Amino acid sequence: MIERDIRRVLDQNGVLPSRQLGQNFLTDPAVARGIVDFLELTPGDAVIEVGPGTGALTGHVAGRVRKLILVEFDSRLAAALREKYQGCDNVEVVHQDAVDFDIRRLFAERPIKFLGNLPYSSGGAIMKNFLSVPHPFDRAVIMLQKEVIDRLGAGPGNKDYGLLSLRMQSAWHVQTVMQVPPEVFYPQPQVDSSVALLTRRNDLPAFDRRLFDELLRRGFGQRRKQLHKLLPDTVSWAQVVEELGVQATVRAEELDLFQWLKLTHLFDNHPLKEIPQKSGEIFDVVDENDAVLRQATRGEIHEKQWLHRAIHVFVFNKKNDLLLQQRSRWKDVHPGTWDSSVAGHLDAGESYESCALRELVEEMGIEQRSLVEVGRLPPSPATGWEHVTLYATRHDGALRFPCSEIDTVQWFSMEIIEHWLARDPEDFASGFVACWDLFRRSVG
Ligand code: SAM
């Protein structure tokens, strides 16, 4: 869209560009097309665009993807977009503040990409809502004021390097791909803009994201102060200095991302932080009737596909959302897939119920006494040759999980899971899928 068309759309809809809503509309179709090209769209993709405005970017996406969701806060522009795309069943216009948009339903739309020439005013909050882990996107292209984009991609030794850089880079590879001058907007902003391409990051070791964020906040709270004066004294500073290979006087802004992750690991006091799975654990080997035959190690049982025992627990909150965990990328079975709230093997001689109660504490930090037995599953390839007992319970408090086992967790509504599972069963561990079917059958 060129400036004349944009002014016409704004006039027709009674919109006077608002500074508060960051309404600076792109007037150069070549720039718009160039920005969209960084998404590398394929027909199977879904795209969510935040702040579509007069549709400068939207026009280069519509018709090229499986689904397009537009989230626009200005009711008049949202209505104009709805009218423009009324014949297109795969374009959905949502009139909403993107800061409050519930991104959980987008997991059911994977593969999905994020696009936004974001309003300067709320760009930070919108990025936090959409681009923090867990999120469903493989790729995102965002435009914001140059100063913010510079901070996203900065490294140590750069004045722009800080909390925002590390938070973003712990989830994404960040690349600045375009500089955009004020002249290609109507009205013209007072500052330059830049475009960043974000691609999902899979090259980092397991780390506790909550702890990482807490340490960053402490470290950058007073960025000129020496780091050891700002962090808890639970770990010997001499050990930190040695393992990170830094001076004792180091400051937060001098550590790179990998040093921050190492630091997080040193401060992580979760008992299971080191061991994604223990192949030497001893389990009961059982027959088809679940009678104990003998004992063997976890490694041997899995290798020889002998029948053994496990539990799954579905944890619900008071909204009736189900807690799912995303398994660590470093697990030997079903790495990176979404799984039951809690799942685990029975130790030799252990009962199903005491295993479930133990795993709730060990795996999710949930102290629980009351469990409801949902049902039982016979051994099959889907359960990994396990006799499974599925339990359900309720929990609304804090969660604490080992990063060696679990990448992240999220509460999802039953409808989202149903839709997601139907579209993309590969996203889930097969044991969860079998438990989900059992659960659906048992609740009718
Ligand atoms: N995408 C259009 C373009 O490139 O010309 C418009 C970009 S303009 C910088 C930002 C857009 O975001 C505006 O349409 C504005 O109304 C919308 N917006 C502002 N705050 C928003 C919010 N919190 N949620 C969703 N949209 C918002």
Image (cartoon, rainbow, N blue to C red):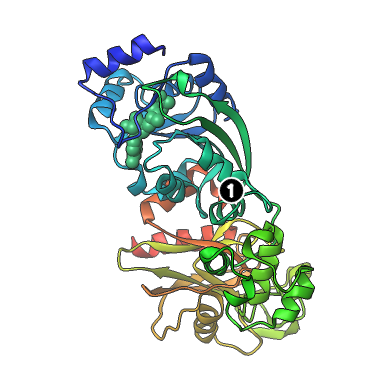
Label 1 near ligand 1 (CB < 8 Å) = no
Quarter of the picture for ligand 1? top left
Residue ranking furthest to the top: 4
Callout 1 secondary element: loop
Q: Picture coordinates of residue 161 (x, y %)?
A: 61, 51
Q: Quadrant of the C terminus?
A: bottom left
Q: Is residue 15 visible from the viewing direction of this image?
A: yes
Quadrant housing the N terminus: top left
* Nearer to us in this view, 59 or 317: 59
User: For the image shown, how many numbered marks are present on the structure?
Assistant: 1
Q: Is residue 233 above or below residue 144?
A: below
Q: Position of residue 328 (x, y in %)?
A: 64, 62
Is residue 178 toward the left or the right of residue 23 in the image?
right
Which residue in the structure is indicated by mark 1?
160
Q: Residue at x 70, y 71 (%)?
A: 249
Q: Quadrant of residue 372?
A: bottom left
Across and down, in percent, residue 245 comes to 79, 68
* Furthest residue toward front: 224
Instruction: Give the side of residue 241 with respect to residue 320, left or right.
Output: right
Residue at 57 percent of width and 63 percent of height: 223
Amino acid type, callout 1: Asp
